[in-house]
Amino acid sequence: MSTLNTPPNAKLRDNPELAQLFRVAESRHFTDTEFKQYLALAPEYADRVAAAQDIMAHELTVVTTTIKQVFFLYPFSKYHEFPKDKCIRDVSYVSAYATHSMLMDDPDWFRDKLLIWLKTILQAFSYPAREERQLETPSQGLPYPEITARADTLPKRRRAVYETYARLIMNYKEVLSPKTFALIQPHLQLAVDILASD
């Protein structure tokens, strides 16, 4: 295994050893051994490994919080079977693939590998309208009302998807280091932009 000697415009995924490493780890995060292999090939990306480990440490909590917020707003349970489990699975996939995209520094890979496919799947479903809730006090409301306000400007079929991934970004921002968030945010934003588009 040798360190990458790639031209400035080359992509990490063009390296056969790294491409194989990412192929083996599809749909999940790297193991400690895989992080070591990655660093042996791309030592200049040590900051991205630290960021990926930060994301992994918080992912379950962030994804679960995001889904709770979305389910508070949208009555998925009335219309779909096992919706919470499926949503946690799907949002976790997006988080893992976004992390790989960050490690590769390659949003095109993320778009082509997962987002276009997942968008097609999501468009096949109908999503319930948001339920209006009477709250006793404003503090009972969810954080990020600006996300809900922005969702209200979108076609109804895109609102729940937009809120899910926009809230994922903000929930990660709450717990990640500023450096980690700066590295992952563009990849998560790409998920919002593609998955919530027509």
Image (tube, helix red, strand yellow):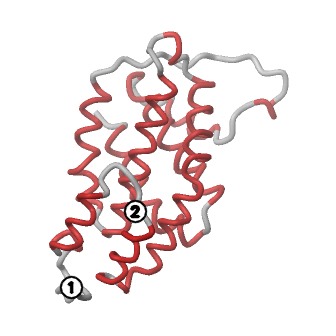
The quadrant holding residue 143 is top right
Proximity of marks 2 and 1: CB atoms separated by less than 8 Å: no
Image point 15% across, 72% down: which residue? Answer: 16
Across and down, in percent, residue 124 comes to 27, 22
Q: Mark 1 highlights which residue?
A: 8
Identify which amino acid the numbered label 1 is placed on.
Pro
Across and down, in percent, residue 186 comes to 41, 60
Considering depth in this image, is 31 or 53 the residue closer to the camera? 31
Q: How many residues crowd around disc 1 within 10 Å: few (fewer than 14), some, or many (20 or more)?
A: few
Considering depth in this image, is 150 or 143 the residue closer to the camera? 143
Number of residue marks: 2
Image point 28% across, 36% down: which residue? Answer: 119
The quadrant holding residue 57 is bottom right
Identify which amino acid the numbered label 2 is placed on.
Phe
Q: How many residues crowd around disc 2 within 10 Å: few (fewer than 14), some, or many (20 or more)?
A: many
Residue 91 in the figure: left or right of residue 19: right
Q: Nearer the viewer, mark 2 or mark 1?
A: 2
Q: Is residue 121 above or below residue 8?
A: above
Q: Is residue 174 above or below residue 94?
A: below
Q: Is residue 158 above or below residue 8?
A: above
Label 2 vs 1, first from the N-terminus: 1
Residue 61 in the figure: left or right of residue 160: right
The numbered mark at residue 30 is: 2
- Quadrant including the C terminus: top left
Image point 23% across, 50% down: which residue? Answer: 113
Image point 37% across, 37% down: which residue? Answer: 196
The numbered mark at residue 109 is: none
Disc 2 versus disc 1: distance between alpha carbons? 25 Å
Across and down, in percent, residue 89 comes to 44, 37
Query: Residue extending furthest right?
Result: 137
Residue 115 in the figure: left or right of residue 182: left
- Quadrant including the N terminus: bottom left
